[in-house]
Amino acid sequence: MSEIAERTLAEELSELLGSGCVSVEPATIAEHSADKWFASHAPDVVVFAECTEDVSRLLKFCCARGIPLTPRGSGVGYVGGCVPLRGGVALSLARMNRILEINNEDGVAVVQPGVITGELQAAVKERGMMYPPDPASLKECSLGGNIATNAGGPRCLKYGVTRHYVLGLEVVLADGTVMRTGGRCHKNKTGFDLIGMFVGSEGMLGVVTEAILRLIPHPESRATISTGFGKFIEAAAAVQAVLGSGFHPAALEIADKFTLEAARDYLGEGVVPDGEAHLMIELDGHAESVALESAKLMALLKSRGALSMELADTEAGCERLWGLRREFSYSLRATGLTKLNEDVVVPRGRLVDLVNFAEELQMECGMPIACFGHAGDGNIHVNIMVKDIETDEGRARSDEVLDRLFRQVLEWDGVISGEHGIGIAKKRWFAAAVGDVSVDVHLRLKRALDPGNILNPDKFLARASE
Ligand SMILES: Cc1cc2nc3c(=O)[nH]c(=O)nc-3n(C[C@H](O)[C@H](O)[C@H](O)COP(=O)(O)OP(=O)(O)OC[C@H]3O[C@@H](n4cnc5c(N)ncnc54)[C@H](O)[C@@H]3O)c2cc1C
């Protein structure tokens, strides 16, 4: 788009929505060009919606003129999902950040999409309630982004992913129509599961402008156990032993040798338990049952060869142990390499196979690979550590490693994304992951809801003819 046309679009949008909602400031444009993946593309204009009516009017305008529009929450996605690949409008929902209602009797919170996940969690906790989905980015990411990516986190083992907590949605469709689906009832089988269709749709089927979320009673007490194991295989066997002995922890996290070494370099010796593998287990519930289960679990871990064990049973103590887990990502970044964080999932029985495969792959390709993540779900973050991602050669080599990783994961009946979504990052593997018929169904849905293909175009549903 030419500079004049750019100004005209911004001017027209200012007229439509008010000048305070529209920006073409270079710094604002740059800020809305990328997320935490490495690709970027500038939008022509950034619009900050303040209400559903703004979003509806904007979409009507864009639909009539075929202007691409990419919704954006906090921009901390890992797959380039909110990168406006075709320019046009970057629609920020960040100003729609009000918690409209917390209702303990109905067990619901009504929120705007720009509310930060951790802020909702803190607000409902004060009222004795819990909103369980806990992506590690919860201090920054938005609930709208979580809904659009169906975000998960460590607690998903016991509590499930974002989809399990969305009871109702207000969505603005591509032509500006405002649709409400679901409501504040905890069960609802009226028609198709349209909520399920929008959750995880990565901004390609509609813009979420309000959500009714399910809350559950906050557990009275929690405990965290941090253990070191000599070898990964022993830690993985302990995972199976824990789940096979009737325990259902809130979280069961594992980390491999490379991750622990990076953490030792970054945080200093002594902070990270000894051994080549780390296992962290979180229990919650009534204080008596948490204490009893913790003791039994520690005995079990000892019998499975744990080298060291630390138990925390206060809020501050648990958070201190989780602090270590949350530093893993930053420790890997501190190596100075680019971290391609792949959130693959394998059937849980394949955990050891996956880590062995990653070790072989790293020896053959000469790129370090670090594995850590949600062992209880088989959802392991396989981090390919790339030296020269900005060069064509570096990109080609990392694509080759990813080809091999994803091929193997699919052969094991695994999936290429358990949390982050497909976006641009995994676009080239999408068809192999879901099959041609499923791709076709995705495309038919997209065509039905967004015939002009204006909503977040060129992501994993790029149409061959366009
Ligand atoms: C350090 C770190 C740790 C992370 N840990 C986790 C984790 O444990 N689990 C996990 O699942 N993810 C994790 N992520 C990834 C990321 O935080 C999630 O994908 C999160 O849901 C993105 O939210 P966001 O508000 O930043 O969305 P954005 O990045 O802004 O957008 C993500 C996608 O959602 C769409 N979108 C955003 N808002 C709306 C809306 N209102 N309506 C329609 N579409 C919309 C965008 O178009 C885009 O396709 C992590 C990221 C980082 C940087």
Image: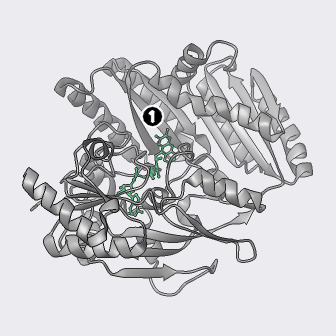
Q: Nearer the viewer, residue 422 or 146?
A: 146
- Image quadrant where one finds the C terminus: bottom left
Q: Quadrant of residue 76?
A: top left
| Residue extending farthest right | 288
> In what element is the residue under mark 1?
strand
Label 1 crowding class (10 Å Cα cut-off): few <14, some 14-19, many 20+? many
Q: Indicate the position of residue 430 as horizontal and vertical percent values.
A: 29, 52
Residue found at x 89% / y 44%: 291
Give, as a three-letter code, the residue at label 1. Answer: Val
Q: Indicate the position of residue 306 as horizontal and vertical percent values.
A: 75, 25
Q: Indicate the position of residue 452 as horizontal and vertical percent values.
A: 17, 72
Say whether residue 350 is visible.
Answer: yes
Residue found at x 73% / y 43%: 282
Queried on whether the Cβ of the residue with tag 1 lies below 8 angstroms from ligand 1, the answer reads no
278 lies above or below 47? above
Horizontally, residue 350 falls left or right of residue 202, namely right
Q: How is the image coloured?
A: one colour
Q: Nearer the viewer, residue 372 or 239?
A: 372
Horizontally, residue 344 falls left or right of residue 375, namely left
Q: Indicate the position of residue 431 as horizontal and vertical percent values.
A: 26, 55
Horizontally, residue 258 falls left or right of residue 1, namely right
Question: What residue is disc 1 on?
Answer: 382
Say whether residue 245 is visible.
Answer: no
Residue found at x 27% / y 22%: 388
Q: Quadrant of residue 399?
A: top left
Residue found at x 54% / y 44%: 378
